[in-house]
């Protein structure tokens, strides 16, 4: 997602990173990308196949930093018409 950014989070952001890491049982990259998204004031779009756990990390990250969380369900059209 953010391949060109440094891999380390600055020391003054460690409390936020640690709080998210406890809430997200996910990779370091997801925690880092979540911190970047929150600091940028942006939205995150998690894309993966159904059943791979996208809602829980989003919900837990929002709770960790006292933000709101919304989930949008999208189904691609399977018909050609």
Image (tube, grey):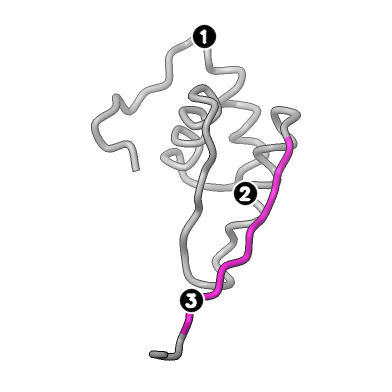
Q: Earlier in the sequence, mark 3 or mark 2?
A: 2
The numbered disc on residue 32 is none
Residue 53 vs 59, above or below: the answer is: below
Between 59 and 81, the residue placed more toward the observer is: 81
Q: Is residue 79 left or right of residue 52?
A: left
Extent of the magenta region? 68-77
Q: Is residue 29 left or right of residue 23?
A: left
The residue under label 3 is 76
Q: For numbered disc 2, what is the local secondary structure?
A: helix
The numbered disc on residue 12 is 1
**What is the crowding at mark 1: few (fewer than 14 residues within 10 Å), some, or many (at least 20)?**
few
Quadrant for the C terminus in the image: bottom left
The residue most toward the top is 12
The residue under label 2 is 57
Looking at the rendering, which quadrant does residue 55 occupy?
bottom right
Say which residue appears at 50% left-offset and 50% top-offset: 45
Q: Earlier in the sequence, mark 1 or mark 2?
A: 1
């Amino acid at each position: 997602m953010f391949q060109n950014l440094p891999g380390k989070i600055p020391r003054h952001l460690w409390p936020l990173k640690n709080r998210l890491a406890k809430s997200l049982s996910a990779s370091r990259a997801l925690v880092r990308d979540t911190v970047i998204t929150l600091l940028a004031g942006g939205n995150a779009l998690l894309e993966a196949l159904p059943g791979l756990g996208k809602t829980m990390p989003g919900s837990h990250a929002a709770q960790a930093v006292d933000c709101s969380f919304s989930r949008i369900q999208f189904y691609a059209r399977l018909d050609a018409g």
